[in-house]
Image (tube, rainbow, N blue to C red):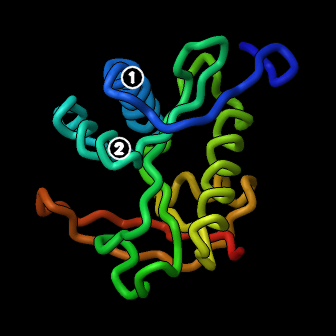
């Protein structure tokens, strides 16, 4: 596994050329979550059609090491499903965060979060927020997030998800 000293990580918005890499990373992440006992993503939903709108709106962010996409997430300005009470502009929201297993260990994730913090500040937000399966609670606390609460959230495919919600206040 590469360590931070071994490879510079470049963070930027994804392009249409990154879709296959994004989906591959997300499928690796989905398999990892299933193995950890916290399935969150339906693999059948991880399609180019899912990714394309985020890319078109410049909401998919990728981390690259030596030109290879090694991590990704979405960064949006609204999240009506998981944070419906937030007024417009209050926060930026991270979703779909995944890192190639060969690059796992926190530092790629930290770079993606740091980028999210930078953009949230530039947008004038008061917080960077995310939600996750409760089993991942400690991961996000280690990254500097503060636990807000646990919620049952209905999603578009009519499943009910139990999520822990976190934020970093800016």
Which residue appears at 36% of the width and 69% of the height?
79
Q: Is residue 132 left or right of residue 107?
A: left
Image coords of residue 129 (percent x, y): 54, 67
Q: Which mark is residue 162?
A: none
- Circle 1 packing at 10 Å, graded few (<14), some (14-19), many (20+), is some
Q: Which mark is residue 18?
A: 1
32, 56: nearer the viewer: 56
SS under mark 1? helix
Which residue appears at 29% of the width and 42% of the height?
56
Which residue appears at 49% of the width and 56% of the height?
94
159, 120: nearer the viewer: 120
Image coords of residue 83 (percent x, y): 40, 77
Image coords of residue 28 (percent x, y): 42, 24
User: Which residue was labeled with disc 2?
Assistant: 39
Quadrant housing residue 147 = bottom right
Quadrant housing residue 80 = bottom left
Q: Quadrant of the C terminus?
A: bottom right
Q: Is residue 142 left or right of residue 33?
A: right
């Amino acid at each position: 596994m590469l360590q931070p000293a071994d490879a510079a990580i470049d963070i930027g918005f994804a392009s249409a050329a990154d879709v296959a890499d994004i989906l591959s990373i997300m499928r690796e992440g989905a398999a990892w979550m299933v193995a950890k006992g916290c399935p969150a993503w339906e693999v059948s939903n991880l399609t180019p059609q899912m990714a394309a709108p985020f890319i078109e709106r410049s909401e998919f962010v990728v981390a690259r090491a030596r030109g290879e996409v090694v991590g990704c997430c979405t960064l949006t300005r609204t999240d009506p499903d998981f944070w419906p009470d937030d007024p417009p502009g209050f926060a930026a929201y991270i979703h779909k965060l995944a890192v190639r297993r060969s690059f796992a260990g926190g530092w790629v994730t930290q770079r993606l979060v740091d980028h999210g913090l930078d953009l949230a500040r530039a947008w004038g937000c008061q917080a960077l927020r995310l939600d996750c399966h409760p089993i991942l609670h400690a991961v996000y606390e280690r990254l500097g997030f503060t636990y807000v609460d646990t919620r049952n959230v209905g999603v578009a495919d009519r499943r009910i998800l139990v999520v822990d919600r976190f934020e970093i206040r800016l």
